[in-house]
Image (cartoon, helix red, strand yellow):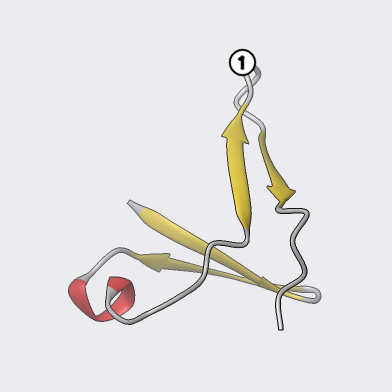
Amino acid sequence: MEIIVKDQNKITVLNMTDQVSGGQGTKMGTAYRLETGQVIYVPDNETHS
């Protein structure tokens, strides 16, 4: 599995390892893969502080 990180115009692809997947976090939205293969991200409506 891969994690894709976009920071403004820079895109980084990380391979899933214990070091990459470890830690705590907060759900920010949901990603969907369309029939065309395109992946879209839908942010949650909650405000995160």
Q: Residue furthest left?
A: 18
Residue 45, picture quadrant: bottom right
Q: How many marks?
A: 1
Residue 4, image x, y percentages:
53, 62
Quick check: 24 left or right of 33? Answer: left
Residue type pointed to by label 1: Glu
Residue at label 1?
A: 35
Looking at the image, which residue is at 60% across and 34% down?
32
Residue at image position (62%, 62%) is 28
Mark 1: which secondary structure? loop
- Name the image quarter holding the C terminus: bottom right
Position of residue 21 relative to residue 49, above or below, is above
The extreme top residue here reads 35
> Is 35 left, or right, of 7 in this rendering?
left
Neighbourhood count class around disc 1 (C-alpha, 10 Å): few under 14, some 14–19, many 20 upward: few
Q: Nearer the viewer, residue 12 or 26?
A: 26
In x, y percent, where is residue 34? 63, 23
Does residue 22 appear left or right of residue 5 in this picture? left
Give the quarter of the image for residue 5.
bottom right
Residue 7 in percent (x, y) is at 71, 77
Residue at the spot 30% in from the left edge and 71% down from the top edge? 21
Q: Nearer the viewer, residue 45 or 32?
A: 45
What residue sits 19% from the left and 74% below the top? 18
Height in image: 24 above or below 35?
A: below
